[in-house]
Image (cartoon, helix red, strand yellow):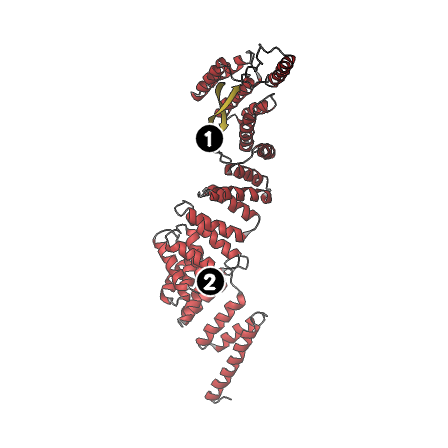
Amino acid sequence: MKVVIMKAATINNWKPKKLFSCFAFTACIGISLVSTPAAFADKSAKTSTDNKQVQDTQVQNRTVKKKRVRRAQTMRSKIFKKLDKVRELTDANDYIAAAKKLVAMGEIKRNSYEVAMTWNMHAYMHFNQENYSAAAQAYEKILIGKRVPESLVQTTLYSLAKLYLIQQDYKPALETLNKWFALVERPGAEAYVLRAQVNYQLEQYKQALPDIKQALSITLEKGKKPRENWLLMERAVYFQNKDYISMERCLKDLIAFYPSSSSIAQYWVQLSAIYNELGNVDAELATLETAYDQGLLLKESQLVSLAQAMLGKDIPYKSAQIMLQGIKAKTIEESAKNLSLLGDALMLAKEYEHAITIMKKAAELSDSAKDYYKLAQIHTERQEWDQALANVNKAMDKNDPESRFAITVHEARILKGLVLFNMKDLMLAKAEFEIASESMAAKKIADQWLKYIAGEEKRIAFIAGTE
């Protein structure tokens, strides 16, 4: 038996939309079979029966010999040496010399296997130059060749599919991969992931799901940890399919398998967002709080989101502490928006003095009606009527209905009326409530105040003896 080994080019460790990796050589083996000598009958046999058996045996042997005439093609030593020289030149980045040698080989008479392996080396050279289109064309030449070993067909189809994917030719990539799957008895997990990625790029999310699940199943059955980017692919497919329940499980897997990942904080935040999507507010808050307690929330957006969630769940003190610590650490910017949120938290936590200091800064930075209105509310809580009136007037003067910082005018008039009433200016308070009552949203509470003021006016008149 004669065995000749030739190294063939393949692409390993593919990653989407990047310069992925260089070819690695894999062995392709051509075996030439030598026919076994025919077994002849003893020449000394004299009977006609024996002669007849000898003739039959010879006929059978000739038939067997004919069946064995078709030998597997092999790589001749001189061809192997030439191709190996091309590989050395390619690895040394001497592409001009490598290309010349490949062109020269076109003048040599070669069998179909040698031709296929020559095109394989063309693909290797072009890939190393990042000329993916030319590499793909070389692989296509292999597939249209005659008597190409099935093992080479398989590796060529797989490499060609990756090249199509690199070039974002997703449809031919999928067609080529499907041909490969039809030839392979037990595809590996990576192949399923590759096809899932192609279907994802084609926005065929439902078709991508079975393949990524199969890849993860194969990996887990072997007792291995799924790759992080495979779980990210699964997460992306679930997101596109709006399968938030499955996405919750996938994010938990990412957190469990990769607690030291550079993206671990992102996984926690995304998990909290999924709970929000599922309407599980308690789980959303608990998830963010757990991430915060582990020191994983380092971005301003993450910390502010947690502070807002705390405020929404009526936990103002911790909301304020998160904002204060973030501002102190310079993780959270001391902007008008952030200070306004902090002021809200402090006010609801009844930390009025601190809230006033913060809201004054917020109002100075934003010069908005909303922040002056909040400041007026805090002073009202502290029964500081002069400051409350000054700030509610500023809020009404600066109000712009088109601004996102706009206030509701009838609410401002109700607050102003309340302040004026407590300042014993019943006439002006009454005027504010009368204007506010023109709004259907404020009519009920404004009418209650007007009735109360009317009663108060009668009481004052009675005491004064004018009634």
SS of the residue under disc 2: helix
* 245 sits left or right of 293 in the view: right
Secondary element type, mark 1: loop
> Label 2, on which residue?
312
Image position, residue 458 (x, y; %) = 51, 85
Report the amino acid beneath label 2. Answer: Gly
As drawn, 285 above or below 299: below
Residue 353 shows in the view: yes
Q: Which mark is residue 21?
A: 1
Given residues 262 and 155, the one toward you in this image is: 155
Q: Is 84 in front, or is 58? A: 58
N-terminal-most mark, 2 or 1: 1
Q: Residue at x 57, y 42 (%)?
A: 208
Q: How many marks?
A: 2
Looking at the rendered image, the disc whose residue lies closer to the viewer, 2 or 1, is 1
Q: Is residue 193 above or below residue 70?
A: below
Residue furthest to the left in view is 328
Q: Is residue 299 left or right of residue 145?
A: left
Closer to the camera in the image, 363 or 17: 17
Q: Nearer the viewer, residue 400 or 35?
A: 35
352 vs 82: above or below: below
Residue type beneath disc 1: Ser
Residue 13: image x %, image y %? 47, 33
Check whether the beta carbons of the residues at disc 2 and disc 1 lie within 8 A of each other.
no
Which image quarter: residue 446? bottom right
Q: Residue at x 34, y 52 (%)?
A: 329
